[in-house]
Structure formats: C-alpha cells, structure tokens
Image: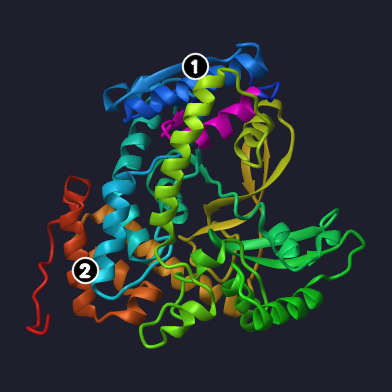
C-alpha cells in the first residue's frame, strides 16, 4: 500500500500524519512517498520520518523521496491514499504580500488563509497546482482517496470535487477540538467526559448545534451564562466566538482570531476600539510564521542530535480514515464535502463540513437538514466568496477575481469597489508567476481619486 504526501516539506505535519500511520498496525508496512519542491525541507522530513520509523515501527515502512514537478507522477503512481498539505508561495513572499498590500488600502487581517482577500489570493495561486495534481492522479492513481489539509479548505476541496474526478475529503482539526476548547475556557472541564456534540456548517464556521453531557443534559444554557460573564469581566483569546454565542446563540469551530475577519462586524476602520475590546490580534499569521520558522530551526537541531524519535498518535483524522478504509471498520469524522442534499439551506455547490462515516467503501456524508436560518445566512456570506473564487480559478478571468473580492463580507464592508479592484490588480501583479494566469480580462480604470 502506498501513501503519498504532497507538501512533505511541512515537516511537523508530515511527522504527525505519517508517524500516526507508522503506529497503526494496518498501515505500518506502507510505502510512504514524500513529495515537495523544497529539497532542504524534504530531506529534513525524510530524516525525521526514518528516525520515527526505526524507533516505533521497526523500520517496517519504506520512505521514498520525490523532489520537483518532474517527479510528481512517480510520487503519485499507484497511491491508495494521498495527503495534501501544500502552501503555494510560502510565507515569503506570498503571505507577506497577502497582508501588506491590503494594509495599504486600510484593510486589516488576522490570518488571511480561509476567506477575505488573503484567502481568495491563496486559493487562486493554489488551485492551478491542485489542477495539476488532479490530472496526474486521474491518470496514475484514479481510485486513490485525497485527504486535503491545505487552506483555504472549502475553496480547494470544492474545486477538486466539482471540477475533477478525484475522490476528495477535506480535513480540519478545529472541529475536533471545538467543544473541548469551549468547555475548558469556561471552567466546565467536568463535562468533557462522555459529552455528545453535533457540529455542521462550513469549514472554520461550522456550528456547535448541540452539546450535551454524558447524562443527556443540555450544556448550552450554562455555556451562554458563563460566556457572557467572561466577556464582560476579562480579556481573553476567544472573545469573538463568545460574542457569537451572545448574538447568534451558537459557538463555532474555528478560533476567534480567524472568525474576526470572516464577517463585517469586528475589523472596522470606523470603530477601531473594537480591536482592543475583543482582543483581536491583527497580523497574527505573519507573526506566527516567523515564530514557527525560528522554533523549527531549534527543534531540528535537537532532533538531529538525538537521532531517535518517538511518536504518539495525534488528533489528526488521516490515519484513522486510512485504517477504516483498509480494515473496513467504521469511523466517524466531520469532513468537508460537496453539499449533495446535506444542508438544505446552503447552496448545492457549497463545500460543507458535516458528520461523515468512513468504511471500506470510502467517505459517506450524513444528512443534516436545515441549519437555523441566521446561521445559514452567516455561512452563505462566506460561501458566496468561496464559490466566486473557485469560478475565478476556473475561468482565469480577472473580472471574476474582482467579483470574489467584492462579495467578501469584510472587504466589502471596508473598501469601495474602485479600491477593491485596484487592490486585486496590485496583488495579482505582485504575486508574479504564481498568478500570471489571471492577468487577462478587464483592466481597472481609476476614477481620478486614487
């Protein structure tokens, strides 16, 4: 059995997913194909995974490295599972561009990898690479299951499911830690064991629709009371989502620093005090990238000197999905899939995050029905931009890029149409070869006030 990891230079993540596989009896003899375009990071991943393989797996797995696009077909040929964790353009220059140019127009962001102008640009430079992956997979491993971990999750997964024949599910660990984070943050750790949760919506904005303790008691009344009190009396890192609870009645899956930029409510030039009031970390993702790069250099030195590396199975879904498929056992996940009659009041082309059952025949999404109307409406403000960004990636027309940005809730709330168009033009130009396919189409004409 062959497991191919695309973007294996993401060493920490490759270590988690493939280390999980090495510690799983049904997967530990696999051929693990590591693919990346960064030779240095690829070699680091290989050395670490070989050490884990020797330490916990008796060297059973075979680890093979494939570097560069000319080796993509060989990396994918015969794969049963493909894990995607690429980041096209990396922190420098792509992420820097995604933050610095919008900042010139007065548009501030926190993470910029899911929606917003940063998420749109990330999708537009990533989907052409995903298209190349899909064409090769359809040829050399047509029955493989693609496990997509790359952001923007909904846009990339939507593209793969709508425009290719690749069997795909999108996976995000934020749904796995959602209720645990909420209960711990509110001092309700005693309710963790045996809790029953129900989550559905879209990636990074899936809703904790219900949460009961092991005895069947509804935990939301106490959650609402404690969340309101905590937001009113102290500064903390989850204030935006607690405000969701106050006004929408429900908690959602992804962190407050993410959700601050998914709507028009919190990052507003006319209300700058909201940033401090809700403790919103502007430019958080660039800081995180710089910190992680420095931490990785230190961690690599320690690992390289030790030689022997252990591993405990992580929270990631990937190895559990593979195990369920290989052993034909049943495993429950929340996966990102196409909305084929799953959530009635979201667009049928939307990529939704819903409960799914996995077994030997693959991933089986579960019917949700209707979300509460206001939650579906919140989701659709994001879905609109997701669908339009995918449309732009397919058409390669610059005017379609404009449409995606114009319908983004945060961008539209802050900028004029002229500024949105000018910003898109500047970002497309700055991203250079990564986005040269979008340079045709309508040319922006200024109105003389810019």
Q: Report the magenta stretch's main SS.
A: helix
Q: Residue furthest right?
A: 215
Circle 1 — which element?
strand
Question: Dot 1, how many residues are within 10 Å of its Cα: few (below 14), some (14-19), or many (20+)?
Answer: some
Q: Find residue 359 and report its image quarter.
A: top right
Quadrant assignment, res 104: bottom left
- The residue positioned 76% from the left and 77% from the top of the image is 226
What label does residue 423 carry, if any? 2
How far from the left and from the top, in percent, is residue 202? Answer: 54, 62
Q: Is residue 339 magenta?
A: no
Image coords of residue 122 (percent x, y): 34, 53
The residue depicted at 31 percent of the width and 41 percent of the height is: 129
Q: Is residue 392 visible?
A: no
Local SS, label 2: helix
Q: Quick one: label 2, few (<14), some, or many (20+) residues within 10 Å?
A: many
Is tag 1's residue or tag 2's residue first in the polypeptide sequence? 1
The reply to whether residue 396 is in sight is yes
Location of residue 98 with respect to 289 vertically, above or below: below
- Which colouring convention does the figure follow? rainbow
Read off the magenta span: 5-22
> Which residue is rendered at x = 64% and y = 19% of the image?
28
Tell me the residue that label 1 is attached to: 63
For residue 29, which numbered disc appears in the image?
Answer: none
In what quadrant of the picture does the N terminus appear? top right
Please count the marks in the image: 2
Q: Quadrant of the C terminus?
A: bottom left
**Place of residue 337 in the rendered image (x, y in percent of width and height, measured from the top left):** 54, 51
Separation (CA) of disc 1 from disc 2: 44 Å
């Amino acid at each position: 059995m062959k497991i191919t990891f695309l973007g294996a230079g993401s060493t920490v993540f490759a270590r988690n997913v493939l280390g999980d596989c090495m510690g799983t009896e049904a997967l530990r003899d696999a051929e693990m194909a590591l693919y990346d375009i960064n030779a240095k990071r690829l070699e680091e991943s290989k050395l670490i995974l070989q050490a884990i393989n020797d330490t916990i797996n008796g060297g059973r797995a075979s680890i093979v490295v494939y570097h560069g696009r000319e080796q993509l077909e060989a990396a994918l040929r015969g794969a049963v599972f493909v894990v995607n964790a690429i980041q096209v353009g990396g922190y420098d220059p792509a992420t820097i561009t995604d933050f610095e140019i919008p900042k010139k127009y007065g548009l501030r962001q926190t993470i910029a990898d899911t929606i917003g102008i940063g998420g749109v640009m990330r999708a537009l430079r990533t989907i052409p690479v995903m298209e190349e992956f899909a064409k090769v997979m359809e040829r050399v491993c047509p029955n493989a299951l693609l496990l997509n971990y790359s952001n923007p999750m909904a846009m990339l997964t939507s593209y793969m499911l709508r425009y290719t024949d690749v069997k795909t599910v999108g996976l995000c660990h934020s749904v796995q830690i959602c209720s645990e984070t909420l209960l711990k943050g509110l001092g309700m750790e005693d309710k963790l064991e045996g809790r029953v949760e129900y989550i559905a919506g879209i990636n990074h904005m899936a809703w904790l629709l219900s949460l009961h303790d092991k005895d069947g008691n509804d935990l939301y009344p106490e959650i609402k009371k404690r969340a309101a009190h905590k937001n009113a009396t102290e500064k903390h890192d989850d204030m935006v989502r607690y405000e969701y609870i106050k006004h929408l009645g429900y908690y959602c899956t992804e962190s407050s620093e993410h959700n601050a930029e998914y709507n028009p409510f919190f990052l507003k030039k006319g209300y700058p005090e909201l940033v401090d009031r809700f403790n919103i970390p502007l430019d958080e993702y660039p800081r995180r990238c710089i910190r992680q790069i420095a931490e990785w250099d230190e961690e690599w030195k320690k690992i390289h000197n030790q030689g022997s590396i252990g591993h405990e199975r992580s929270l990631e879904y990937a190895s559990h999905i593979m195990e369920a498929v290989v052993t034909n056992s049943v495993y429950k996940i929340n996966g990102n899939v196409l909305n084929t009659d799953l959530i009635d009041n979201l667009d049928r082309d939307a990529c939704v995050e819903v409960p799914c059952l996995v077994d030997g025949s693959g991933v089986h999404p579960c019917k949700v029905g209707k979300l509460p109307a206001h939650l579906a409406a919140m989701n659709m403000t994001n879905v609109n931009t997701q669908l339009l960004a995918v449309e732009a990636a397919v058409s390669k027309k610059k005017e379609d890029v404009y449409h995606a940005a114009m319908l983004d809730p945060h961008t539209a709330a802050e900028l004029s149409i002229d500024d949105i168009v000018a910003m898109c033009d500047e970002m497309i130009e700055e991203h250079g070869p990564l986005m040269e396919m979008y340079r045709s189409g309508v040319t922006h004409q200024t109105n003389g006030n810019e």
